[in-house]
Amino acid sequence: MVFYERGFEPNASSPFLQESSTIKLFDYHDIPYFLRGNPYITRGYRAFLSFRMCVKSVFVFSNESINVWSHLVGFFYFFCLLLFDNLVTIPESSGTTSDYVVLSFLLTGYMICMLFSACYHLFCCHSERVFHLLLSLDLAGISLGLCACYIPALYYAFYCHKVWQVLHLSCAVFLTLISLVCQLHPAFLTSRWASRRLFIFCSVVAYGIVPALQWILLLGGLNDNSVRLFVPKVIVMYLLGILAVGFYAFKVPERYFPGKVNFVGASHQWWHLFILAAYDWWHHSIVIYMKYRLKYHCSAYKELATTQIPFEVS
């Protein structure tokens, strides 16, 4: 049966809010319409839990458990990296204030993205109002996470070309602001805009190809040592992103195995894991590039472009 009608939202005193000692899990056709995003996930849903029960449900294995825990763990992982970078990595590399700022921005953006995502997946079952509020924060977190990827990458890529550095950093921030402004549209969170939301975020990601190509041309193509060193890292980052979007957009593998991956192995879980892998890979790549720039700077830029430089990747 469907026991929540469209448009109905229980308040804090409603008997529909679960406050018992056990948390019920429902089938797809028994949940409110706003939670019905993926018909191939047929059971394991939480519905209309109070905030207290939502917190309690983090220890109940549902179809959201991996989504919640993957990004909760991701939040604490990147927090540890933030401490390690600021206390160990940057001081050991004789980093400047700018290095502290850009790496901290990177990891703080990651942490915001992880935290907003975990909160959305944990509390989305409270009510329709809370669902949409947290979904908007989750999407804003994605925008900030993408911006966080751009800032240090553009800073170090155009380390020796300050005009282009400022221009591309400004473009990245501007695109992020556009994606955030689009989220103010009243239809942005509706299912009708699902493809548009994906297009907006993919467009922000695709912009990175423009500065990447210019960076390669400015440095002289594959003749440059840093291009040979870091282009493969950029390619891996985009491949991870493509895999994440592919699983998410096409609802693979549950589209082909409805009801078989309700709790483990669903597309959104793969999306989370690929995003975690991409963020971690990009942080590792940025740290390597930071060490590269701190070691060679721009003083012998023309010589570095065509000289084989023994640089230890660690």
Image (cartoon, grey):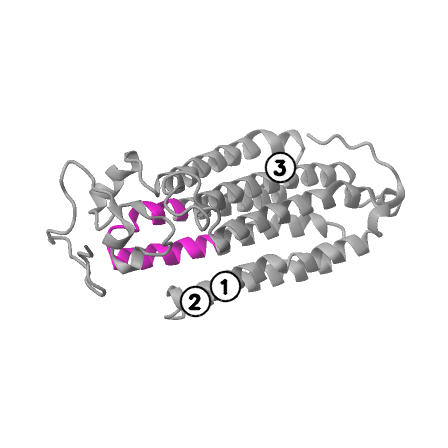
Q: Nearer the viewer, residue 255 or 101?
A: 255
Residue at numbered disc 1:
179
Residue 201 placement (x, y as % from top left): 53, 59
Question: Mark 1 packing: few (<14 Cα in 10 Å), some, or many (20+)?
Answer: many
Q: Which residue is mark 3?
A: 284
- Determine whether label 3 and label 2 are within 8 Å by CB: no
Residue 55, position as x, y percentages in the image: 26, 40
At a point 78% along the width and 53% down the height, the residue shown is 216
Task: Give, as a three-letter code, the residue at label 3.
Answer: His
Locate residue 81, reporting x and y percent.
52, 34
Disc 3 versus disc 2: distance between alpha carbons?
Answer: 34 Å
Identify the amino acid type marked 2: Trp
Q: How many marks?
A: 3
Q: Check if residue 160 falls in the magenta segment.
A: no
Residue holding disc 2: 193
Which percent across, then down, holds residue 154?
66, 52
Q: Is residue 182 visible?
A: yes
Which sits earlier in the primary sequence, circle 1 or circle 3? 1
Q: Amino acid at mark 1?
A: Ser
Name the residue located 68 percent from the left edge and 42 percent from the top edge: 233
Which region is colored magenta? 117-142
Q: Is residue 129 magenta?
A: yes
Q: Residues within 10 Å of mark 3 (few under 14, many from 20)?
A: some
Mark closer to the observer (3, 2): 2
